[in-house]
Image (spheres, rainbow, N blue to C red):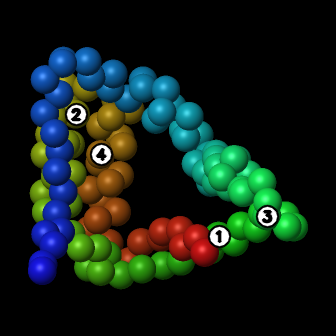
Amino acid sequence: MTSAIGFKFPFDQSDQWDGFNDSGIEHFSGNPYVHLGREVAQNTLDAKREDAKGPARIMIQLVDVPTNSIPDVKALRSAMKACLLAAKNESEKAQIFFSQCAGDLKQEQGQCFDDF
């Protein structure tokens, strides 16, 4: 049995696009590492079993990974280019975001979080 790896971007038939002012995106603006650290810790505390003994523990590591190790990175690059093109009709914030994404995907290595 094989599973397909790829990216799916569903069409918004409700025409309810909030753009880059969506509160879910705004929550992580500014310093994403601070917000991510806070969110991961809160989710861990929320998910801890009541019968667990001892504190919940979190260990997060920022690692460099080869960009070409991203499954179907060619399709992701293509999607980011298409998003950058569409962002011309969006805000400056959207243009900067997708420009940065496209630039990051051109690099040989990038950073990601490895949580365990």
The answer to the question of whether label 3 and label 1 lie on touching residues, with beta carbons closer than 8 A, is: no
As measured in the structure, the alpha-carbon distance from the residue carrying label 3 to the one carrying label 2 is 47 Å
Looking at the image, is mark 3 or mark 2 earlier in the sequence? Answer: 3
The answer to the question of whether label 4 and label 1 lie on touching residues, with beta carbons closer than 8 A, is: no
Q: Residues within 10 Å of mark 4 (few under 14, many from 20)?
A: many
Give the residue at mark 1. Answer: 60
The kind of secondary structure element at disc 3 is loop
Q: Position of residue 79 (x, y in %)?
A: 16, 52
Looking at the image, is mark 4 or mark 1 earlier in the sequence? Answer: 1
The kind of secondary structure element at disc 1 is strand
Give the residue at mark 4. Answer: 98
As measured in the structure, the alpha-carbon distance from the residue carrying label 4 to the one carrying label 2 is 8 Å
Q: Position of residue 34 (x, y in %)?
A: 68, 50
As measured in the structure, the alpha-carbon distance from the residue carrying label 4 to the one carrying label 1 is 26 Å
As measured in the structure, the alpha-carbon distance from the residue carrying label 4 to the one carrying label 3 is 42 Å
Instruction: Tell me if residue 61 comes above or below residue 48 in the rendering.
Output: below
Give the residue displayed 42% in from the left and 26% down from the top.
Answer: 22
Decide which of 54, 88 is in the foreground and name it.
54
Q: Amino acid at mark 4?
A: Phe
Give the residue at mark 3. Answer: 52
Decide which of 22, 53 is in the foreground and name it.
53
Query: Looking at the image, is mark 4 or mark 1 nearer the viewer?
Result: 1
Query: Looking at the image, is mark 4 or mark 3 nearer the viewer?
Result: 3
Looking at the image, is mark 3 or mark 1 earlier in the sequence? Answer: 3
Looking at the image, is mark 4 or mark 3 earlier in the sequence? Answer: 3
Q: Amino acid at mark 3?
A: Ala
Q: Residues within 10 Å of mark 2 (few under 14, many from 20)?
A: some
Q: Amino acid at mark 1?
A: Ile
Give the residue at mark 2. Answer: 87
